[in-house]
């Protein structure tokens, strides 16, 4: 079972890597902003698979924080790039 | 080669690639995105190194807070100078050479370790039960190296003072210039209403679980800071001026309680920062709770930046 | 019983991996940022959901399973909102901004 889960984690890592390379090579800033969200889904999937494969429940907590901060980072990117921001 | 070593090599190659693209990026904004992605990926690498505590901190600090600080810096640069200001060639060469020297030094230190790596880890594990803690990292932070941990929290306050002191005299004690994403009824408002309750539960959980499992005050405090910033960015609550008493009390309450318990240890346990036997765990949990609050407020204010306006009555 | 659960895990995780593959293909092939956002925030979320579903039998008791589901819900929530935010940025700046 463990080696199947490791294999699946490796597969997801490949998908994330491909996605990241594509996203970060595109010229548009809006494409770059998607990078954090990609890690929010793919990175969480990798960590959950690793947690199950190594039977280390505390890795699930890392996935939890990764999900939370990926969302936070994505918001920060959009806000920073937005022309509508102003001081209130 | 096993599946695992293929996974690890792939992860390292990806990290190096993202790192290189961060350095090579021409736009500061693209470089910050690369850096944040690097931080989030690095937390997976720490998990593979069995350092779950570090992985948690990296996801929170590397992925969230540092990115936020750098985005603030990028925005400031845009306003201050325009985007295409490059350092002169000698300065760039000097920076490159110095970075290469540091990297080479680190590489030498890591690649040629002493034959028997000195470690106190077995002793920590042997004596951990006395403290009542289950997480050896928390044991080292709050029992064996409590002085380091205390000083680290004080450094955080000094860093905050450093940021505040960038304010011109006339706005001292004013409101930090955190820029607000001002769009009424936007989806961001919705997120800022839904996410913070979840985040606060996660922060309390992180702080509580830190005594037994990976986690602790720093991770919990960072989550609190991120949630506070989210609410302020969405404009749901105003950015407080830095002269507020409650705010300053919250910034120092963690280190003050830590210091007070440390001083009490001189009387009750015969040494500074020692805990009376049997009371170690409750005292450490109390310190962690206070530190979580202080770290949360301090990090939030660090990201909010120096004061830029005075309070309008 | 264990064998049944393991087969369930293997099939659900594989299906999840397939959707993550589809999401990546979408990121590679779709012509503009708005369509790519669909691949990123919908297909990938479904993939993660299937991975979580598959890992439920391996979870650390009912609370461990509940935590896994909560993480998926958290990613769902943030994915939906981040998609809206980025789409707003695309509308404001144009697809090449």
Image (spheres, coloured by chain):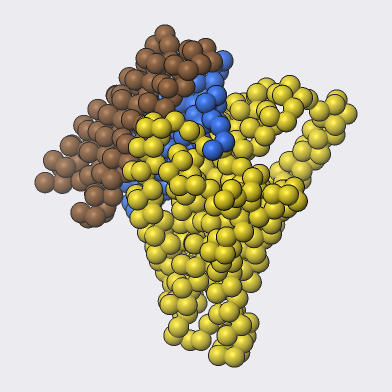
Of all residues, the one furthest to the right in this rendering is B90
Q: Is residue A9 above or below residue B253?
A: above
- Residue A22 pos. (x, y %): 49, 18
- Residue B96 pos. (x, y %): 79, 33
Q: Is residue C68 left or right of residue B2?
A: left
Of all residues, the one furthest to the left in this rendering is C1
Colour of the chain lettered B: yellow
- Residue B212 pos. (x, y %): 40, 66
Colour of the chain lettered C: brown
Of all residues, the one furthest to the top in this rendering is C31
Q: For residue A25, which quarter of the picture?
A: top right
* Front residue of this view, candidates B195 and A5: B195
* Front residue of this view, candidates C54 and B157: B157
Residue at image point 25% right, 44% down: C69
Chain in blue colour: A
* Front residue of this view, candidates B294 and B93: B294
- Residue B111 pos. (x, y %): 68, 46
Residue at image point 39% right, 37% down: B189
């Amino acid at each position: 079972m463990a080696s199947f889960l490791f294999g699946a984690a490796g597969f997801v890592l490949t998908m994330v890597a491909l996605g990241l390379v594509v996203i970060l090579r595109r010229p548009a800033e809006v494409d770059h902003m998607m990078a954090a969200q990609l890690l929010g889904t793919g990175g969480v999937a990798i960590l959950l698979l690793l947690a199950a494969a190594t039977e280390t429940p505390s890795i699930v907590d890392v996935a939890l924080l990764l999900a939370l901060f990926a969302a936070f980072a994505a918001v920060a990117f959009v806000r920073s790039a937005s022309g509508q921001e102003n001081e209130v | 080669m096993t599946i695992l070593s293929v996974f690890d090599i792939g992860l390292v190659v990806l990290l190096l690639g993202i790192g290189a693209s961060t350095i090579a990026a021409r736009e500061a904004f693209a470089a910050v995105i690369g850096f944040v992605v690097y931080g989030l990926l690095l937390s997976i690498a720490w998990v593979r190194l069995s350092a779950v505590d570090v992985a948690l901190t990296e996801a929170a600090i590397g992925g969230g807070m540092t990115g936020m600080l750098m985005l603030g810096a990028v925005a400031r640069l845009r306003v201050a100078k325009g985007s295409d200001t490059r350092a002169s060639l000698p300065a760039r060469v000097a920076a490159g050479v110095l970075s290469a020297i540091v990297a080479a030094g680190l590489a030498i230190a890591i690649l040629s370790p002493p034959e028997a790596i000195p470690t106190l880890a077995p002793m920590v594990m042997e004596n951990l039960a006395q403290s009542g803690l289950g997480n050896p990292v928390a044991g080292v932070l709050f029992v064996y190296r409590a002085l380091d941990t205390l000083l680290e929290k004080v450094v955080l306050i000094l860093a905050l003072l450093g940021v505040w002191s960038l304010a011109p005299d006339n706005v001292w004690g004013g409101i930090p210039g955190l820029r607000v994403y001002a769009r009424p009824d936007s989806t961001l408002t919705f997120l800022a209403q839904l996410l913070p309750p979840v985040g606060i539960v996660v922060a309390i959980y992180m702080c509580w679980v830190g005594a037994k499992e990976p986690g602790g005050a720093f991770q919990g405090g960072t989550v609190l800071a991120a949630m506070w910033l989210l609410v302020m960015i969405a404009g749901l609550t105003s950015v407080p001026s830095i002269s507020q008493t409650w705010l300053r009390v919250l910034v120092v309450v963690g280190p003050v309680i830590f210091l007070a318990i440390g001083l009490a240890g001189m009387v009750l346990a015969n040494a500074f920062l020692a805990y009376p036997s049997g009371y170690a765990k409750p005292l450490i949990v109390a310190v962690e709770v206070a530190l979580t609050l202080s770290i949360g407020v301090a990090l939030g204010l660090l990201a909010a930046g120096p004061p830029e306006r005075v309070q309008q009555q | 019983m264990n064998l049944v659960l393991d087969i369930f895990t293997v099939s659900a995780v594989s299906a999840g991996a397939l959707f993550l593959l589809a999401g990546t293909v979408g990121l590679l092939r779709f012509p503009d940022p708005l369509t790519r956002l669909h691949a990123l925030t919908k297909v990938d979320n479904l993939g993660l959901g299937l991975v979580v579903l598959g890992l439920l039998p391996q979870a650390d008791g009912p609370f461990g399973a509940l935590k896994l589901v909560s993480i998926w819900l958290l990613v769902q929530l943030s994915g939906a909102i981040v998609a809206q935010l980025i789409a707003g940025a695309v509308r404001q700046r144009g697809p090449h901004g």
